[in-house]
Image (tube, helix red, strand yellow):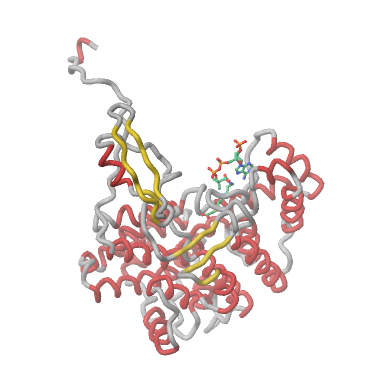
Amino acid sequence: MAESITITDNRSGESIEVPIVDGGVSAEEWSKLLPGIWFYDPAFMTTAAAESSITYIDGDAGKLEYRGYPIEQLAEHSSYLEVAYLLLHGELPNAAELEQWTHEITYHTFIHENVRKRFLEGFHYDAHPMGILVSAVAALSTFYPEAKDIFDPEIRYKQIIRLIAKMPTLAAAAHRFSVGMPFVYPDNSLSFAANFLSMMWKTAEPRFDANPALARAVDVLFILHADHEQNCSTTAMRVVGSSHADPYSSCAAAAAALYGPRHGGANEAVIRMLIEIGSMENVPDFIKSVKEGHGRLQGFGHRVYKNYDPRAKIVRNVAYDVFEVTGKNPLLDIALKLEEAALADDYFVSRKLYPNVDFFTGLIYQAMGFPMEMFPVLFAIPRTSGWLAHWVEMLDQETKIARPRQLYTGTARRDYVPLENR
Ligand code: CMC
């Protein structure tokens, strides 16, 4: 028998049976019984805002899959560009498709000289690179006005390529300007991750060859961050995209959502927390203060995962690979002690608080020399492919404009009072 629920409106005694489909109940069915009665769910805690076939998360079991492929297998065997293709097309590319895709992305990495000279150089010397990135992505829409034609398949595809390709260029440029270093042009002979590292760190040498272990570590981190279903920034992408804004404007909105410390800034908070703890001996006192309600254990807990975040397990291993090259981040021992103490403490165990992806990523980025301001930028580069996959899916579903209702709690109608009577 098909699963369903029955709701009764006690005011009228009327009932309606609503089928449970794919783990959800259709709000459209409910509204037939309850017209004008809205569901109050401000942070979408119990609302599925989309039907999606891109990413699957089982938060209780700690599972993450892109298009059905477990994240562990993709992190071990795949590359970021292959994963970006998978997210957007639904299938892994064959050799010819991957070559074509890689070629197209590689040859769209340059940005218009005016973006660099007039726009990026206009920022104040100490501008936050994420602020620069958000604005630069929005500004790209003015360079590609045809992007407004979102239902033309060729135009749409071209903007997808451009956005994925130009994100590392803009990201590295944002960093270079914020530290007063000259812009480095993309090197088309390098892989996606190696090219990004070249644009970040190249100085006087004719060609910058990143350490292969570090380039691979960045690529794996890009795979892990490429998508995470209906997170805050992806929801922003879908909401803004539902107004049929061009993809650059929608991506800028998504990147703005990622700028917030609750989303893209948690790994920075982890580093700041570890610095504040200062040494392993202080870990028990820190745990005690968190349990007493003084702040949170940063990098722990997740809205969806009620188990070890599968990405955190992979990141932990990546950290060791990176530290072999860079030397150990001195904060690692404090982090490991903190993890051990929290996982053995009933406060965290009973609330199902486990390390999330951000617990170790900051340690890696810091060891590689990235300043903390770049952490959300490093997140935005790969998440662009996820945002775009959701944008395409949403447009193909012919989704209506996102427009929630509210429960009005303000003053009842009243008459205007002239200034002299107030
Ligand atoms: N340290 C201490 N206690 C915590 C923590 C934490 N990190 N996270 C949750 N709790 C407690 C919280 O106090 C509450 O306890 P009680 O029931 O006694 O009031 C309970 O656990 C449930 O917390 P919640 O705030 O209702 O959970 P949420 O789903 O709204 O919050 C979260 C999820 C990620 C915002 C939260 O766990 C948190 O603030 N973590 C630290 C920040 C962090 O690491 N953020 C990165 C998330 S992963 C990035 C991504 O995927 O984009």
User: For this view, does 297 lie left or right of residue 162?
Assistant: right
In the picture, measured across the screen, residue 173 lies left or right of residue 336, that is: left
On-image quarter of the N terminus: bottom left
Q: Residue at x 31, y 41 (%)?
A: 16
Quarter the C terminus occupies: top left
As drawn, which residue projects farthest toward the top? 421
Residue drawn 48% across and 70% down?
68
The tally of labels here is: 0
Coordinates of residue 193 in the picture (x, y in percent): 52, 75
Q: Which residue is situated farthest in the front direction here?
A: 1
Query: Residue drawn 36% across and 77% down?
Result: 108
Answer left or right for 196 relative to 111.
Answer: right
Tell whether 35 sits left or right of 105. left
* Quarter of the image where one finds residue 138: bottom left
Residue 281 lies, in percent from the top left, at 82, 46
In the depicted structure, whether residue 189 falls above or below residue 145: below
The answer to whether residue 47 shows anywhere in this view is yes
The image quarter in which residue 307 lies: bottom right
Pick out the residue farthest to the right.
Answer: 281
Ligand 1: image quarter: top right
Residue 244 position within the rendered picture, expressed as x and y whole percent measured from the top left:
24, 58
Q: Whole-percent x and y of residue 207? A: 53, 83
**Observer-nearest of 214 and 314:** 314
